[in-house]
Image (cartoon, rainbow, N blue to C red):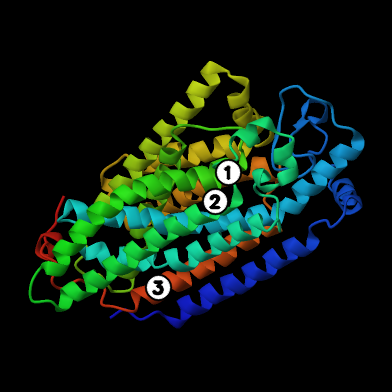
Amino acid sequence: MYTVSNRLKIGAIILMIAGFALTFYGFYAAPKTVAQSKEMLKSHGDGHGESHGAEVTVVDEGHGSYSEKAGGHTMTEAEHDEHVFHQLSNKPWAAVYVAAFFFFMIALGVLAFYAIQRAAQAGWSPLLFRVMEGITSYIVPGGIIVFVILVLSVMHQNHLFVWMDKTVVAKDALLQGKAGYLNPTFFLIRAAIFLAGWIGYREYSRKLSLAQDESDDNSNFKLNFRISAAFLVFYLISESIMSWDWIMSVDPHWFSTLFGWYIFASMFVSGITVIAMVTIYLKSKGYLEEVNDSHIHDLAKFMFGISIFWTYLWFSQFMLIWYANIPEEVTYYITRIEDYNLPFFGMVAMNFLFPVLLLMNSDYKRLNWFVVMAGIVILAGHYMDIFNAIMPATVGDQWYIGIPEIGAILFFAGLFIFWIFRALAAAPLQPKRNPFIEESRHFHY
């Protein structure tokens, strides 16, 4: 049995405390009035505030949640000040939302990988099942936190989703046309159904997995196979809709038909990366003795392959929209290229160039420290991916990596580490009666 070390517990708790304190300060320091936001801008040399002022069409009348450079009226100084105030007010909320969703999506990506291994009856991976089950345990607290943020958005405690403002919708014909789908009640119902399905599968599959160890037959294994195959159908549908709801709808005037796959690729590679890093950590502490270099090699192959897949989707989405040059589509990328140039193109380098250069060589995939180094870059890159998806629509050009962003990352990293390692300590790390356990033990690439 694995036991969580005091050092790991204390480290995770310190991360949570420090993260909570910094996040709290981020909310405390956020401007409460237009006058405060103007003073804040002056102290920062006016930030990015008026760099594109004459070109911005304010759709939300000041909430800062949606704007586009596509003609329209030029903002007055008062409108500009109100606009920037709401962007700065959104900043700590957006920072928390980005970090909360990022760590939740890691667990959700692992859940998909786990279900695929079960449905495919893969022979190489059963030795890693307990690691996957430990990581997916975070779906419960992570999902609840994201849901609470969504509920607070519906209650107008923040302005992350502009379409939740009735005043904005009343003045926007396009949002009125989407009101049947983008309405707060239906939004929360969908979110609750998705979370119930993901959590329900994880808990039931985990129960069957543990029961199989004590069983005299393979009935639990076979049932787990069937529910995993069915769950994957639900997952593909629910994950796509979730990506539209929780990510794409912060830009309600923009849409992409492959956005669901794009977000899936990001969460999938992030999840597999964390599986590899947790496995390597446990092996370094003397656990998972039967997990060999070939298992790590295969995980690194997935990290490499899904990074290429993510890049293919990113390029397909970007290239087609850039080439078509349709005004209502290109505004999404104009905002990011003009105001988020470094994080936008930087995350492409981190999510594509680094995995290709670091993991192309087969021998490097067997070096634990090399896989961990590549994994850190990949995780940082996909955090920036979610950052680029959320921030432009919620804080506009008033972004920077500051106290709220760092605090949120520290808090959720600490919670993630604390929760998954506690789950890993709840059951033996090695399954005993999986029919493919011997094949997994003798797996060699």
Q: Identify the mark nearer the N-term, 1 or 3.
A: 1
Q: CA distance from mark 2 to mark 1?
A: 7 Å
- Report whether 382 appears left or right of 280: right
Residue farthest toward the top in the current orientation of the protein: 324
In the rendered structure, are the residues bearing label 2 and label 1 in contact, judged by CB atoms less than 8 Å apart? yes
The image quarter containing residue 155 is bottom right
Q: Quadrant of the N terminus?
A: bottom left
At label 1, which amino acid type do we have?
Answer: Leu
- Report whether 273 appears left or right of 21: left
Q: Residue at x 67, y 31 (%)?
A: 173
At label 2, which amino acid type do we have?
Answer: Phe
For the residue carrying disc 3, how many other residues have a C-alpha within 10 Å: few (<14), some (14-19), or many (20+)?
Answer: many
Q: Residue at x 28, y 74 (%)?
A: 286
> In the rendered image, which residue does mark 3 sit on?
421
Question: Is disc 3 placed on a helix, strand or loop?
Answer: helix
> In the rendered image, which residue does mark 1 sit on?
182
Residue 194 percent across, percent down from the top left: 43, 55
For the residue carrying disc 2, how many other residues have a C-alpha within 10 Å: few (<14), some (14-19), or many (20+)?
Answer: some
Whether residue 269 appears in this view of the structure is no
The image quarter containing residue 276 is bottom left
